[in-house]
Image (tube, grey):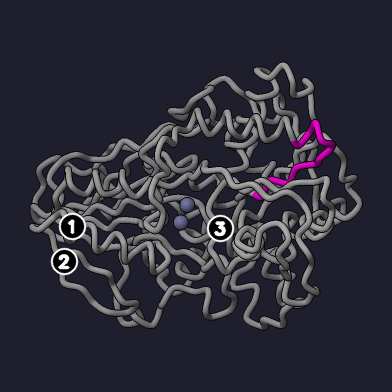
């Protein structure tokens, strides 16, 4: 099994992987690409179903994954009450602890057999895997499977560009037979002239203008990855900008702070930018939780870097946005991916002057605050994904992890540009001959 995620917006059975499709199979190994909810969120459940399966991931993914899954138990326990989902929590804190004790930590760039031993270079017939750095979030990997002279490479979530902390992916350039590729950004062309440093400048100017005008700025982020990227970026701006008043306060959520601690502890071990930067000490964010969020002052000149990134109901960013969106002096800066049906997507697309209901139980609100969108995605541009596929020129390409228009653009483009490759958009539950 490659990854064992939970759907970030659906609940109950709709949020689970299609386990029926593998009910009568023996699962020998589960390989986890990284610790985002949509890749690791149902792992304890899967391990219960397949107790003999060995589970492999990087050490950083294991450390972050354990924090994330414990948090998920708390979220599901709350949801049991709030939305009456009686199957929740899908697993307990105890089961999460027991599961994580069985995870095996794997180094990058080492061939390992799925029985867990370090594999010799040229042992045919042995199924092996190897983790490659994916440049997406701390611990993230692409996974190369080899057996009987054939190879399958799964990109996981990847970024081929440097971010503020994360350095770009280092993926295999060898012959690969089957490429399983993410398509998150397939429906957006890279804006002409976009560069990350240019976008950082645009962000800095917008933040200065907002603060000058008396705005507090909400920045919805994922707890893992985007929070740490934004803390590093805001830290850089504080130091570099003469205009932004030196030490403007930054707020983050409790889960984000635990993830940030892990980034700090692992700063010297990871291949990263700003390797000596300790975010918790030097960006020094204030930590909010479910209770304190409600009466945290909403003031000018403060940055509220809150999860979730898609502003799922009952998360800090959603609660805070409901307080803020009708106030014209304040602002929301979007910095990453939000699916169009998510509250963040609805708010972004409705824009200033529009109306949005940020939670099903809450009345619609008029959007009066400033809305800005910046492109700091942790995912590869579609152009860089196409370039990679062309360099590899695999026999088959299987497209995953994208909204339908994104997958369709990738399918059409790859089919046109790579005549030797069969491009497959897999239907859930259907078997494909590799
Ligand atoms: Zn991810
Ligand atoms: Zn993902």
Residue 57 lies, in percent from the top left, at 41, 49
* Mark sitting on residue 178: 1
Residue 266 lies in what quarter of the image?
top right
Residue at image coords 50%, 48%: 62
Q: Quadrant of the C terminus?
A: bottom left
Nearest the eye: 227 or 201: 201
Q: Position of residue 395 (x, y in %)?
A: 11, 58
In contact (CB < 8 Å): disc 1 and disc 2: yes
Whole-number angstrom distance, CA of label 3 to CA of label 2: 32 Å
Q: Give the alpha-carbon distance from disc 1 to disc 2, as whole Å.
A: 7 Å
- Mark 2 nearby-residue class (10 Å; few <14, some 14–19, many ≥20): few
Residue under pointer 2: 434
The kind of secondary structure element at disc 2 is: loop
Q: Earlier in the sequence, mark 3 or mark 2?
A: 3
C-alpha separation, residue under disc 3 versus residue under disc 1: 29 Å
Confirm if mark 2 falls within 8 A of ligand 2: no
Residue 93 visible, this orientation: no
**Tag of residue 338:** 3
Q: Residues within 10 Å of mark 1 (few under 14, many from 20)?
A: many
Q: Nearer the viewer, residue 34 or 169?
A: 169
Q: Which residues are magenta?
A: 210-220
Q: Earlier in the sequence, mark 3 or mark 1?
A: 1
Is residue 64 found left or right of 330 in the rendered image? Answer: left
């Amino acid at each position: 099994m490659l990854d064992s995620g939970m759907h970030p917006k659906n609940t109950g059975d709709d949020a689970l992987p299609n386990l029926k499709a593998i009910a009568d199979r023996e699962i020998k190994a589960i390989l986890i690409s990284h610790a985002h909810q949509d890749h690791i969120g149902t792992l304890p459940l899967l391990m219960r179903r397949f107790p003999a399966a060995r589970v492999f991931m990087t050490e950083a993914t294991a450390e972050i994954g354990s924090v994330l899954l414990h948090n998920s138990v708390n979220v599901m326990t709350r949801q049991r009450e709030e939305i009456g989902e009686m199957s929740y929590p899908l697993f307990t804190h105890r089961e999460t602890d027991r599961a994580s004790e069985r995870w095996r930590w794997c180094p990058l760039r080492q061939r390992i057999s799925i029985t867990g031993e370090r594999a010799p270079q040229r042992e045919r017939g042995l199924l092996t895997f190897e983790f490659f750095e994916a440049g997406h979030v701390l611990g993230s990997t692409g996974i190369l499977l080899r057996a009987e002279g054939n190879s399958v490479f799964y990109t996981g979530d990847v970024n081929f560009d440097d971010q503020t902390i994360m350095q770009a992916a280092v993926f295999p350039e060898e012959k690969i037979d089957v490429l399983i590729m993410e398509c998150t950004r397939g429906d957006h062309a890279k804006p002409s002239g976009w560069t990350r440093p240019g976008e950082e400048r645009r962000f800095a100017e917008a933040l200065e203008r907002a603060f000058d005008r008396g705005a507090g700025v909400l920045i919805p982020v994922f707890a893992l990855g985007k929070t740490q990227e934004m803390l590093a970026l805001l830290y850089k701006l504080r130091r570099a900008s003469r205009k932004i008043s030196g030490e403007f306060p930054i707020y983050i959520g409790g889960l984000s702070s635990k993830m940030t601690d892990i980034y700090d502890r692992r700063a010297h071990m990871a291949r990263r930018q700003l390797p000596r930067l300790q975010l918790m000490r030097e960006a020094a964010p204030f930590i909010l939780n479910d209770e304190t969020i409600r009466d945290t002052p909403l003031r000018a000149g403060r940055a509220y870097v809150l999860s979730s990134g898609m502003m799922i109901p009952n998360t800090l960013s959603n609660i805070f946005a409901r307080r803020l969106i009708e106030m014209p002096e304040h602002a929301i800066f979007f910095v990453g991916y939000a699916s169009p049906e998510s509250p963040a997507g609805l708010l972004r697309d409705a824009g200033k002057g529009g109306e949005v209901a940020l939670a099903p139980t809450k009345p619609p609100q008029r959007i009066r605050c400033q809305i800005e969108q910046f492109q700091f995605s942790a995912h590869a541009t579609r152009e860089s994904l196409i370039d990679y596929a062309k360099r590899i020129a695999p026999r088959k390409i299987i497209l995953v992890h994208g909204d339908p228009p994104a997958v369709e653009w990738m399918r059409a483009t790859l089919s046109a540009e790579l005549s030797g490759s069969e491009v497959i958009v897999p239907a859930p539950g259907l078997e494909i001959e590799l």
